[in-house]
């Protein structure tokens, strides 16, 4: 079966553990020496980098959380001078502190290779034409598909957020053989094909790479049956690299984690205790080779389990189960992550509403998912002039759209 870097991806388990141990000690020293946040964290618990002598000592290191990254805005988590950073990444949003991620040239080179590993692992070769239908403006991983395809010699058609009709025409005219997108957009394309009466068997598509949102097995089945392809899951973490942390292979027996760059753990989300292989819990990742932005024991909030037995594809790297749920209240709407605290920040800035609210996602397979936010409002607003009520709804909708990068339906409700 195809493997991009067999010397690493099929490395004997003991050799991989030794490589991880060596790299862990390097990144711990790097983080302690160059990142004030980690120096304080270590000092608070009386831990010295020299105390981390083996992988077994990893559990002594305090966790890093999303809140930590936000509180160290903008460059507090960087381990290199800003002059060495060649790319900055941060999500949309006008409220609160965004998470700012930096990459050196070497970081970007590594990321490019990791996505190439995923591509080769599902059978993409220099003979393929990859249609990338991710949003290039919001999702830097879309650009990575282009650059990673160059490593394996494949051609790329960057269709971004073009309409489903345009996507279909490009598939037909360019004879695209692989589609990279969110699963919801793939379903939207299928819906459009059905309306046009297009038989998927007339297309050249054979492979799909899908991610950025949860998609259960029944969705995979619908995509495969209606596009006539093999659909594969890819996994990334916005605060690390997205995608590039893990990906399925042709065996589809879990997602291979690139352990030479990421050290995974699964913990009990309540106690923080490390769980044995096969047990379900929260995924925690430590970067092993990131120069600009090392993260130690980062809590992803994604729920999965780990398996270390050799895969039938020949790879020996640990595999994680597909992520279908989280430990926090984040929801994904059409590939956009929505955090409740962001909505709270927006609503707190608007007079006459709240503090209570609720979120409802009206689900429909495809790109028709809608997020509705029900917000409590003062009685005089609800019972007053209709024009005032509509104006307030529009103000809330605009503020939420700016903060989330997503159109939101707003319903005003009476306070109990």
Image (cartoon, rainbow, N blue to C red):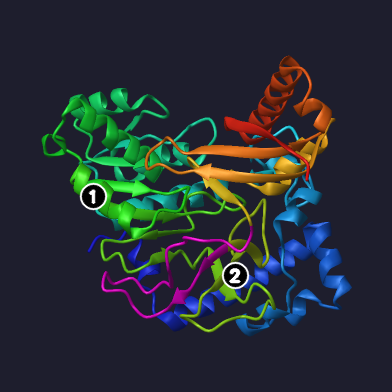
* Extreme-top residue of the structure: 387
127 inside magenta stretch: no
Q: In the image, which residues are magenta?
A: 302-328
Position of 23 with respect to 42 (left or right) is: left
Identify the image quadrant of residue 158. top left
The residue shown at (86%, 65%) is 40
Which residue is identified by label 2?
23
- Disc 1 element: helix
Say which label, 2 or 1, has the lower sequence index. 2
**What residue is shown with label 1?**
224
Instruction: Determine the main secondary structure of the stretch shown in magenta.
Output: loop
Q: Nearer the viewer, residue 197 or 335?
A: 197
Residue at the spot 61% in from the left edge and 80% down from the top edge = 274
- Residue at 39% x, 58% y is 247
Q: Locate residue 258, reporting x and y percent.
A: 46, 64
Residue 98 visible here? no
Which is more toward the observer, 24 or 313?
313
Task: Name the spot of residue 68 as percent of width and height, x first.
Answer: 77, 56
Q: Is residue 324 magenta?
A: yes
């Amino acid at each position: 079966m195809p493997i991009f870097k067999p010397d690493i991806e099929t490395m004997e388990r003991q050799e991989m553990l030794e490589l991880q141990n060596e790299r862990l000690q390097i990144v711990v020293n790097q983080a302690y020496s160059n990142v004030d946040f980690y120096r304080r964290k270590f000092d608070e618990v009386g831990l010295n980098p020299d105390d981390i002598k083996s992988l077994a000592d990893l559990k002594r290191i305090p966790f890093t959380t999303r809140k930590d990254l936000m509180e160290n805005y903008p460059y507090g988590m960087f381990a290199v001078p800003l002059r060495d950073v060649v790319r900055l990444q941060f999500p949309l949003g006008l409220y609160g502190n965004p998470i700012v991620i930096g990459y050196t040239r070497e970081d970007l080179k590594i990321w490019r290779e990791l996505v190439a590993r995923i591509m080769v692992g599902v059978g993409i070769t220099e003979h393929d034409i990859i249609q990338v239908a991710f949003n290039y403006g919001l999702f830097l991983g879309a650009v990575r598909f282009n650059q990673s395809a160059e490593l394996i010699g494949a051609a790329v058609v960057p269709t971004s957020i073009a309409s489903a009709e345009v996507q279909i025409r490009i598939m037909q005219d360019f004879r695209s053989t692989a589609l990279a997108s969110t699963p919801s957009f793939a379903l939207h394309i299928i819906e459009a094909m059905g309306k046009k009466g297009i038989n998927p068997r007339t297309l050249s598509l054979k492979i799909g790479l899908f991610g950025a949102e949860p998609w259960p097995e029944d969705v995979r089945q619908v995509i495969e049956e209606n596009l006539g392809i093999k659909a594969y899951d890819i996994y990334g973490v916005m605060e690390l690299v997205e995608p590039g942390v893990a990906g399925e292979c042709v065996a589809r027996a879990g997602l291979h984690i690139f352990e030479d760059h990421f050290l995974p753990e699964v913990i009990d989300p309540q106690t923080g205790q490390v769980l044995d292989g096969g047990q379900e819990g929260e995924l925690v990742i430590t970067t092993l080779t990131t120069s600009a932005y090392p993260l130690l024991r980062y809590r992803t909030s994604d729920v999965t389990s780990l398996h270390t037995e050799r895969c039938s594809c020949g790879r020996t790297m640990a595999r994680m189960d597909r992520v279908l749920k989280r430990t926090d209240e984040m929801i994904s709407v059409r590939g956009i992550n929505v955090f409740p605290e962001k909505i709270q920040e927006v609503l707190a800035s608007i007079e006459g509403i709240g503090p209570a609210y609720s979120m409802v996602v009206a689900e429909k397979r495809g790109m028709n998912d809608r997020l509705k936010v029900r917000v409590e409002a003062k009685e005089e607003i609800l019972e007053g002039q209709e024009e005032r009520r509509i104006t307030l709804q529009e103000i809330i909708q605009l503020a939420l759209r700016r903060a989330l990068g997503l159109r939101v339906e707003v319903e005003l409700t009476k306070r109990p």
